[in-house]
Image (spheres, grey):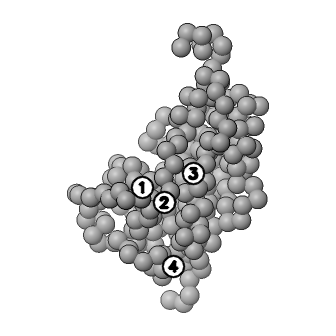
């Protein structure tokens, strides 16, 4: 096998809304892992959580506004265009078919990785993409069961290994952990609070213009 193209990072989620924690993690991995790009992939129907509150078109608009002007950040609407549950394995199959030799890097938070055995056709995922598991600095996680065996068989210890094969490895990577959650931002906005500095200004403007998370005043008064 000849020299492979630079890896592409894949960051999925509801992004309801996208916030600075998402963006900081993506930027640290883009630069620290030598990725060609990070693709933000908003889900249409999240399989493992409640449906998004903001419609797909608005979540897409917020993402595009959030990454505007940042080289290496790309929004991919493939899951919004696909009917049915937004299974990660289906996204990876489609991407792998279009780029057979490109190293793909699926970016997962630790909680998502720990829940991986509950995912649809999860055993196929490591053969379609590398997995980078992001964790807090100074925090370690012991894996057992099927995840423990998966890590024992596939764990990588060098960043360069991500570019040596199209898929198959698992890399644990520490990133700056910002304790920000989309659910908390929605709650803040629902109560009429200001998400300034939790989301990019462009996203804040869209949230306030569309008032998508704001509860009616009569509901606020009873809360």
Relative side of 62 to 160, left or right = right
Residue at which label 1 appears: 136
| Circle 1 residues within 10 Å: few <14, some 14–19, many ≥20 | some
Q: Is residue 101 above or below residue 112?
A: below
Would residue 84 be seen by someone viewing this image from the given angle?
no
Please report the residue visible at 47 percent of the width from the left and 75 percent of the height from the top.
Answer: 159
In the rendered structure, find residue 22 and report the number of the disc placed on it.
3
Name which residue lies at 53% across and 71% down.
33
Task: Tell me which label, 2 or 4, sits earlier in the chain.
Answer: 4
Q: Nearer the viewer, mark 3 or mark 4?
A: 3
Label 2 – label 4 distance at C-alpha: 20 Å
Residue 53: horizontal and vertical position, in percent? 59, 32
Discs 2/3, front: 2
Residue 103 percent coordinates (x, y): 53, 74
Residue at 67 percent across and 38 percent down: it is 196
Q: Nearer the viewer, residue 129 or 25?
A: 25
Q: In the rendered image, which residue does mark 2 sit on?
A: 175
What is the x, y in percent for residue 88? 49, 54
Of tags 2 and 4, which is closer to the observer? 2
SS of the residue under disc 1? loop
Which residue is most to the bottom? 2
């Amino acid at each position: 096998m000849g020299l492979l193209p630079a890896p592409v990072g894949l960051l999925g989620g509801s992004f309801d809304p996208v916030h600075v924690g998402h963006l900081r993690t993506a930027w640290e991995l883009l630069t620290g892992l030598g990725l060609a790009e990070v693709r933000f992939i908003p889900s249409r129907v999240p399989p493992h959580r409640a449906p998004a509150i903001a419609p797909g078109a608005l979540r897409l608009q917020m993402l595009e506004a959030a990454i505007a002007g940042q080289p290496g950040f790309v929004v991919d609407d493939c899951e919004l265009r696909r009917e049915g549950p937004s299974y990660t394995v289906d996204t990876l199959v489609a991407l792998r078919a279009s780029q057979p030799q490109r190293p793909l890097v699926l970016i997962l938070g630790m909680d998502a990785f720990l829940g991986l055995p509950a995912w649809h056709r999860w055993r196929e995922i490591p053969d379609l993409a590398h997995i980078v598991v992001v964790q807090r600095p100074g925090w370690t996680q012991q894996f057992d069961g099927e995840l423990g065996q998966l890590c024992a068989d596939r764990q990588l210890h060098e960043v360069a290994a991500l570019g040596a094969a199209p898929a198959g490895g698992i890399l644990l990577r520490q990133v700056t952990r910002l304790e920000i959650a989309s659910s908390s931002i929605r709650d803040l906005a629902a109560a009429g609070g200001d998400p300034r500095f939790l989301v990019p200004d462009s996203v804040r403007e869209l949230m306030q213009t569309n008032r998508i998370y704001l509860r009616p005043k009569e509901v606020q008064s009873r809360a």
